[in-house]
Amino acid sequence: MQDLIDKALGREARAGRITFTRDAIQHIPGKVRKDIIATAEKEAEGGFPYLPLSLYRDFSITGSRDGYQKPYFQKRKLLSDLVIAEAIEGKRRFIPLIEDGIWSLLSEPVWTIPAHNTYIRDAEQPDTPLIERPILDLFQCETGEILSLTASILSDSLSPILRQDIEHALRTRILEPYITDHFWWMGNDGPLNNWAPWCTQNVLLSVLTLPLSEKEERKVLKTAVSTLDQYISSFPEDGGCDEGASYYHAAALALWGALHVIALSTGYDMRGVFADGKIKAMAEYIEKVHVSGDIYLNFADCSPKAGHLTAREYLFGKAVGSQALMHHAALDADNDWRESDNDYNLFYKYIALSSWDGIREEAARKIDIEKPRFTMFSGTGLAIYRQDGITFAIKGGHNGESHNHNDAGSIILYKGKKPCLIDIGVETYTKTTFSKDRYTLLPMRSSYHNVVNFPPLEQHDGEEYRAETLMMSEKGVSFDLTGAYESGKGLRKYARSVSFDKGIISIAEIFDSDNPAVLSLLSTEKPVIRSRSVRWESFKASFSGKITGSVETIEITDARLRIAWPKRIYRALITLPGPISWTIGFKEEDNG
């Protein structure tokens, strides 16, 4: 394994104290300045909510995350917005409320959310947190970041005693557990996911504003670099993110954030690290899975509405020399400077405003960047084809990926911005989402993806249940999907081949099964099944043999799914007479 960052920094590298000043964000133009101040004033009317133990325990009783997390994040967003407003206005009128917010966060016995209240990955969560042993979860670390930057940006305005209290909290709740305990996301305990760079970035932001001893500095830097190196090593060379576009912002993009903070702390020039081909590929993943506007190809626990790009993507693109990513992010950020994800993170707000001039300059450039007709991520088994406004993707991979759905072989299709064949995504997280009952949830099951199942046999979860890539090129894709289903259950073979040419998608389903073969196709338009075709308003699937089937209407009531989909979506269940080929086309004149 190449320890890319460790080798770049050298064994004797030390972390130094970093500061964030209000000077870097005081050049913001009048309209944005007024908007920031008005937002803070409006949000301040609600004050900082109280989070009682009974609310913490509600997760164990109901399985719902929202009861605790909604006021939890509301509180953090309010404090961050107040800090930014005070930093650019500088009249001290927000200081009393900011100090109330600091006191409110310090008064929380723990910063770990109920859904993450466990020392063992994916284990059952006790209903009461153990205060004496802090758990460094995503949001414990992120709370530390907010308090750290608050104290740094407003160092000349806050009560000296409160600044001491912040330092004490950061030492006892972030620094000490980081250098004396071990959490799974630090590495050496199995596969890593977005927690590794996300937590590491925010731990560094939390503690590197503190006066640390040489021993503490070395331990923090050594641990952070080890985690990040292991995370980079877990990625294929093509930079494919198995967690999908929604998690890119907390995964590869948080890696940029961690590297940026390390550079600020050590004074080391990170250009050598960012020049690495894998790092550039990780950065550009989000651009490669982009469909149009705020729509992205989604697999796993990923929404097609993965959010607009921001200043962070702009800076990551700039660091790795990706003109396409830079320009796309600049255009998005110029239209809305705010973070679409993690809108409570103070560092992200600070980065967005301190990068304002560069983003405006890049957004003003007239550049036409054309997406490639074929993109391949062999590491995750994802192939993407584009032509004449059509975006088509097929995924292989395995069913043990981070945030996995049993979706080997599934396809997604867009015509421009219009969704044709869709991946539902994931519902609002509950206790069930990351429990032993995860695959009882419909969006996780292969029967709710665009692939053939053999009722009652569906795909099984686990890394050993996988697609074997037989061929993947600009001419087409062929997967042997037999291994994604349990053996000995009546299925002897299932292979799917796809070709894409001149706007026509051709698919062959080859199988040998004792059970019926049922093709699921999910759409936002209601399908009509005929003897040899399935028709939607915008497109049509034509089959080489006679088919039968039915249409299921799925009511979309979940708030998270409603962001992406209308009130109803549809699932066509098509019984195949035997091995068959079918094509997808958009020619309106074909009325057969």
Image: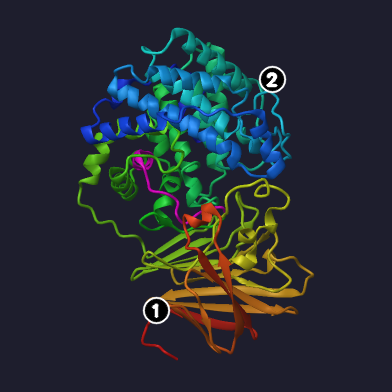
Earlier in the chain: of badge 2 and badge 1, it is: 2
Extreme residue in the bottom direction: 592
Q: Which mark is residue 426?
A: none
Query: Image height check: is 146 above or below 446?
Result: above
Identified at 57% across, 26% down, the residue is 223
Residue closest to the eye, 293 or 565: 565
Residue 432 picture location, percent across and down: 68, 49
Q: Is residue 311 magenta?
A: yes
Residue 423 picture location, percent across and down: 53, 62
Given the image, on which type of amino acid does mark 2 rest? Glu
Q: Quadrant of the image for the N terminus?
A: top right
Q: Is residue 203 visible?
A: no
Give the quarter of the image for residue 520: bottom right
Question: What residue is pinned by disc 1?
Answer: 586
Q: Secondary structure at mark 1?
A: loop
582 with respect to 63 (left or right)? left
Give the quarter of the image for residue 467: bottom right
Please state the extent of the stretch shown in magenta in the rendering: 301-317
Identified at 65% across, 53% down, the residue is 400
Categorize mark 2 by other alpha carbons within 10 Å: few (<14), some (14-19), many (20+): few
Q: Which mark is residue 132?
A: 2
